[in-house]
Image: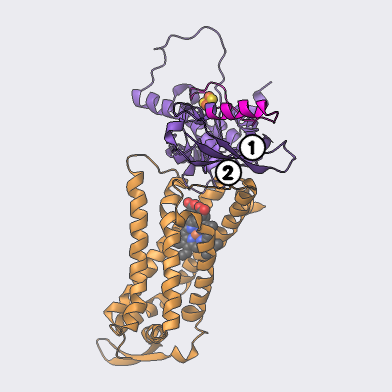
Amino acid sequence: MKVTLHIWRQKNAKAKGRFETYHLDDVIEDMSFLEMLDVLNERLILEGKEPVAFEHDCREGICGACSLTINGIPHGHEPATTTCQLHMRKFKDGDEIWIEPFRARAFPIIKDLVVDRSAFDRIIQAGGFISVNAGQAPEANSIIVPKDDAETAMDAAQCIGCGACVAACPNASAMLFVAAKVAHFAYLPQGQPERKRRVLAMVEQMQKEGFGNCTNFYECEAACPKQISVSFIALMNRDYLKATCSGEKHLLQTQQV
Amino acid sequence: MGIFSYLRSTILSKVVMAVTGAILVLYLIIHTAGNLLIYFGRDTLNSYSAFLHSLGPILWIFRVVLIVSVVLHIITSIKLKFENWNAKPTGYALKHYLKARFSSRTMIWTGIMIFAFVLYHLLHFTFRVTNPQHYSAEFFQMHNAVSTVILERFDVYKMVVLGFKNPLISLVYIVGVIIVGFHLDHAIQSMFQTLGFNEKHYFPTLQNLSTILSIIIVICLISIPISIMSGLVGGEI
Ligand code: HEM
Ligand code: FES
């Protein structure tokens, strides 16, 4: 099949970017979207041109490294699918495809389609963990977790931290990501001791990184390749209010060495 | 700082939006119900209005709560909006919305238009300065066990009827109320989400109820200028 690609090219963080148009005539329907870009890059390299920089790692939809806003939707129009799992058969012969980086002030562009998502790492460092002494794994049944809670915690824990929520949000808000992380601990007994401090610390770090405010557009949920529900944001709002009202101070950052 | 320190927190700002918004929505529901008394005739509406004015200090408690809500709602929304524009300095060349709706994407603009509309509304019916020729008193009889007395009260009914007989004024109200309807369509369900009430088994219903309630409020309110212009109400004036 034939496709026309309009790809955002930008030399580095400082440079002014622009779209460049490429025509591919030899796309096979079974290629993934990233394989299609690989084909383009092979050609660019042969022509002595700079290949398009984009991120990827597992290519099986579990690591969260791939990104790209494809025709105005992070990870493309196929619901619940990462870019690496999106296949060219989902496009039509002759399609024009616009490929842009994830856009947010907190995700500065490094090069072409690659953005710096380390803000997410710093949010995790602020509170996305439980403090336990490492060692032998405890007996699995020594802490009983109700089935429904375990399921809900797993729904939240599906988040692969790709940043599609931020990219989709007109306000570049990271609430869905942070809420998923807060919620997956909030539903488990192991998450309880640090529950209040966690939500305060993670929300504060989220704000420091310059993400926008949630205005309940629900674009994040629609774009999320793991279909994380915005009901987790409601849970986080509730937890945050409770923690604030109880006068909790978050000590998580100072506890770390 | 002081009471405005909540502005430093994104979630507390949202909570203030939701709580002040909820107060305004509740007020709007009561206000709409009160306005519908016009269908029960001149005496009902005028005595309702006289009753409200007789509340004196209690009326002022409500007014202060409303004014504080409006001020906090507006200050907070403006702060949130500027931060949000700043957080997304570059948009997409091609953007495809999946769930964001017209009403959710236009909150700041419908909000500003509502503010202008509310100002006009207050000048028109509360401070009564825009149409002096429509404002007058009414004499009515009051009976008690011993005698009948003639009393004077403000003629709200006549003011409303004469106001809405002017098509331009009616148009402003109809458009204004429809804009309020769009704002509410997003706002009502949004405040539940913000305050932490969203479970998958009821939220879609709640979103539909948000739209339905907005439509009901709009229909109730615009029915008044429409009935008056078409002569169904107030023909006697
Ligand atoms: C009839 C009067 C009004 C009512 C009943 C009302 C109600 C509400 C409610 C309940 C919310 C949702 C809060 C949340 O959960 O986020 C909201 C949001 C908002 N309102 Fe109002 N409001 C009114 C007037 C105004 C005015 C005069 C402005 C002027 C600036 C305004 C601007 C906004 C903005 C910008 C938002 C945030 C929207 C978003 O989520 O993006 N509103 N309103
Ligand atoms: S490359 Fe790992 S999720 Fe797409």
Q: What span is in magenta?
A: A36-65
Instruction: Output the letter for the chain in purple.
Output: A
Asked whether residue A47 is drawn in magenta, I would say yes
Picture layout, residue A244 above or below residue B134 = above
Amino acid at the residue labelled 2 = Ala
In the rendering, at what x and y percent does residue B93 appear?
58, 48
Tell me, yes or no, if residue A254 can be seen here: yes
In the rendering, at what x and y percent does residue B153 appear?
39, 87
Task: Tell me which label, 2 or 1, sits earlier in the chain.
Answer: 1
Asked whether residue B229 is drawn in magenta, I would say no
Badge 1 density bin: few <14, some 14–19, many ≥20, Cα 10 Å = many
Asked whether the residues under the numbered discs 2 and 1 touch, taking CB atoms below 8 Å apart as contact, a structural biologist would say: yes
Q: Which mark is residue A107?
A: 1
Task: Output the chain of dot 1.
Answer: A
Q: Nearer the viewer, residue B106 or A19?
A: A19
In the rendering, at what x and y percent does residue A197 appear?
57, 31
Badge 2 density bin: few <14, some 14–19, many ≥20, Cα 10 Å = many
- Look at chain B in the picture and name its colour: orange
